[in-house]
Each structure stands twice: as structure tokens, then as C-alpha cells.
């Protein structure tokens, strides 16, 4: 038995493994690859180490050990920072973690700060799979950074119209779609990313998301990010946290 995602990966992997060496030695400076600013941009291309990491069976015990190098920024329980400087990784979908990490390594998502700690000389594709499954299973601590709570109705309206379809009614995202869980993520991080997405600076973003967020004002971005940060992040919890 296999899911459509696994079948898709299997087919694509068959093409990739023949392609020879995937991990060329290089300095720990982040490479650059064309992203959303480029015509002909193809979102979430299935190739290289992304495909390999997605196809590996992750081991959470090995992942906990490999995660050691990430703790300095993302914290021991992967709670991130309330001020949004470092995102929460606990409870995020493994597929999303793998996509984001391999996009940084390929240079489609800019993160020079993290690159020296997360490049192929430090973390193997197998360890990416291990870390991802470990983090997915971590229970996010209850407390996360929230916005002012002043424009939640506006946030609710915008979210329902433009974001819910992918990020889910409870902010739970979708593992097979590579849509991040945004519920209980830190507000300041969500706001920064939403702004970067609108301005074309999050270069690995989904083009349909960029289209819907294109005309948002700063107030709209703040309202929707605040609303998202209060969603429970899982289908099982009934409603958003109230201010
Ligand atoms: C030097 C600090 C630092 C270290 C060490 C670090 N990161 Fe990060 N990481 C960041 C920052 C900063 C961001 C947010 C970048 C942004 O704002 O776009 C980030 C973002 C991420 C994201 C994207 C999250 C999302 O919701 O899209 C993932 C996944 C991630 N890091 C995984 C890791 C893993 C795994 C390790 C260890 C191998 C690691 N990081 C080590 C600083 C770090
Ligand atoms: C077509 C599906 C889709 C829609 C619609 C969508 N998103 Fe996203 N969103 C994504 C994907 C996929 C990512 C991860 C970035 C990537 O790799 O493309 C993402 C990432 C994000 C992030 C960063 C989360 C993180 O962990 O780094 C924020 C914030 C965000 N979206 C906000 C929004 C808002 C606000 C809306 C509505 C205005 C919206 N999105 C609509 C698919 C979507």
C-alpha cells in the first residue's frame, strides 16, 4: 500500500538516483538558485537530496542526536523564540521541515545565518529525515508569541477567504501538500514571513499564496498573522485561543 505522495516520490527518485554525485563538496556559504523572482519558476521541484530525504525512513532517536547542532537557535525542545527570531519547529510536518531545509541548502530560500550549521558537511540527507520525524513528534510548548489581539475579526475574515484552503481551518497545514502548520507559531515570525511572501522575498513560496497576499496592507498582514498565531494547529483542539 502506498499513498499518492509516496508513489510520486518513488517515480521521481528512480530518475534522480542515476544522476551521480548529489553532494558536491563546497564552502559553507549558502548557494543561490533561481526562485519565484525568475520566470518559469517551478514550486517544490522533486529532485536531489529533497527527494532522497523524503524517501528515507526517519528515526526519531537518531534525529534527537542530530538535532544537537540546531539547539543553539531553535532551543532544546524546538520551541523557537517568542520574539520570532527563530521559528518553532516542534510539531511541524516532517515533509514541510524537509522541504524548507533542503530549499535552504539548495539556495531557493535565503538563510545565510543557518546555512553553516545545516549544510551537507554537517547534516546528511538521512539525518534530515531523522531530525524531521523527531521534530514532527515533539509536543509544542503551550506558550507562543501572539499579536496585539486588536484585529482578530479582520484576521479571521482574511484567513477564511485566502489562507484556510491550504493552511487548514485550525492552522494545521497539510503534510502531503507541504503546507506548513501555522497554528501556535510565533506571531513575529509569521508576520515577517508573510511580509517576505508578499514582497517576493521568500523565494521558495507557493505562487498561489503570493497571488492572494499580493494586495495586503501592513495592517492586514498583522491581523492575519495574529489570527494564525492563535489557532490551535491541530484538528483535535476545537477553537482558536482567545486574547
Ligand atoms: C544560527 C542559528 C540557526 C541554527 C543553528 C539553525 N537554524 Fe534553522 N532557522 C534559523 C532562522 C533565523 C530561521 C528563520 C529564517 C527566516 O526568517 O526566514 C530558521 C528556519 C528554519 C526552518 C524553517 C521553518 C519554517 O517554518 O519554515 C527549518 C526547517 C529549520 N530552521 C531547521 C533547522 C535545523 C534542522 C537545524 C539544525 C540542523 C537548524 N535549523 C539550525 C536559524 C538557525
Ligand atoms: C496554495 C496554498 C497556500 C495558500 C492559499 C496560502 N499559503 Fe501560506 N504557505 C504555503 C506553503 C506551501 C508555504 C511554505 C512555503 C513554501 O515552501 O512554499 C506557506 C508558508 C506560509 C508562511 C510561513 C510559514 C513558515 O512556517 O515559514 C506564512 C506566514 C503563510 N504561508 C501565510 C499565508 C497567508 C497569510 C495566506 C493567506 C493570505 C496563505 N499563507 C495562503 C501555501 C499556501
Image (cartoon, helix red, strand yellow):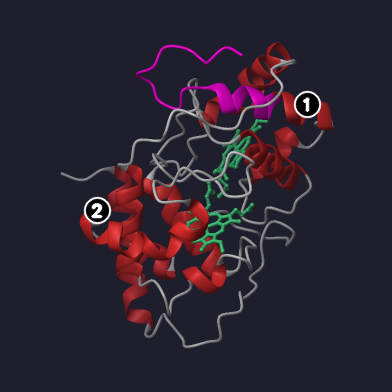
Q: In the image, what residue occupies the spot 64% across and 41% down?
A: 83
- Marks 2 and 1, how far apart at CA: 38 Å
- Tally the numbered discs: 2
Mark 2 residue crowding within 10 angstroms, few (<14) / some (14–19) / many (20+)? many
The quadrant holding residue 222 is top right
For this view, does 193 lie left or right of residue 138?
Answer: right
Q: Where is 4 relative to 167, above or below? A: below
Q: Which residue is mark 2?
A: 60
Residue 241 screen position, x and y as percent: 53, 15
Please give left or right for residue 59 compared with residue 212 in the image.
left
On screen, 192 above or below 103?
A: above
Question: Label 1 neighbourhood size at 10 Å, few (<14), some (14-19), many (20+)?
Answer: some
Residue 88 at x, y percent in the picture:
50, 43
| Residue 110 on the magenta span | no
Residue 131 x/y as whole percent:
34, 57
73 left or right of 57 in image? right
Give the magenta-colored segment's residue range.
224-243
- Quadrant for the N terminus in the image: top left
Instruction: Place residue 139 in its image quadrant.
Output: top left
Q: Determine which residue is flagged by label 1.
A: 220
Numbered disc 2: secondary structure = helix
Q: Nearer the viewer, residue 174 or 186?
A: 186
Amino acid at each position: 500500500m502506498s499513498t499518492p505522495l509516496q508513489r510520486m516520490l518513488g517515480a521521481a527518485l528512480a530518475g534522480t538516483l542515476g544522476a551521480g554525485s548529489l553532494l558536491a563538496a563546497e564552502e559553507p556559504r549558502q548557494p543561490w538558485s533561481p526562485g519565484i523572482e525568475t520566470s518559469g519558476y517551478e514550486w517544490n521541484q522533486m529532485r536531489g537530496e529533497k527527494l532522497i530525504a523524503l524517501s528515507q525512513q526517519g528515526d526519531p532517536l537518531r534525529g534527537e542526536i542530530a538535532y544537537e547542532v540546531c539547539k543553539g537557535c531553535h532551543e532544546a525542545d524546538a520551541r523557537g523564540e517568542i520574539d520570532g527570531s527563530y521559528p518553532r519547529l516542534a510539531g511541524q510536518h516532517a515533509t514541510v521541515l524537509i522541504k524548507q531545509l533542503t530549499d535552504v541548502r539548495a539556495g531557493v530560500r535565503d538563510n545565510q545565518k543557518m546555512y553553516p550549521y545545516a549544510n551537507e558537511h554537517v547534516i546528511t540527507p538521512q539525518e534530515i529525515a531523522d531530525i524531521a520525524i523527531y521534530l514532527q513528534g515533539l509536543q509544542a510548548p503551550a506558550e507562543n508569541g501572539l499579536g496585539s489581539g486588536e484585529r482578530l475579526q479582520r484576521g479571521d475574515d482574511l484567513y477564511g477567504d485566502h489562507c484556510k484552503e491550504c493552511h487548514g481551518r485550525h492552522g494545521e497545514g497539510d503534510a502531503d501538500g507541504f503546507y506548513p502548520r501555522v497554528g501556535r507559531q510565533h506571531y513575529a515570525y509569521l508576520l515577517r514571513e508573510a511580509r517576505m511572501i508578499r514582497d517576493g522575498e521568500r523565494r521558495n513560496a507557493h505562487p498561489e499564496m503570493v497571488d492572494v497576499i499580493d494586495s495586503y496592507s501592513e495592517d492586514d498582514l498583522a491581523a492575519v498573522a495574529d489570527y494564525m498565531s492563535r489557532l490551535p494547529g491541530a484538528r483535535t483542539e476545537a477553537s482558536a485561543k482567545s486574547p
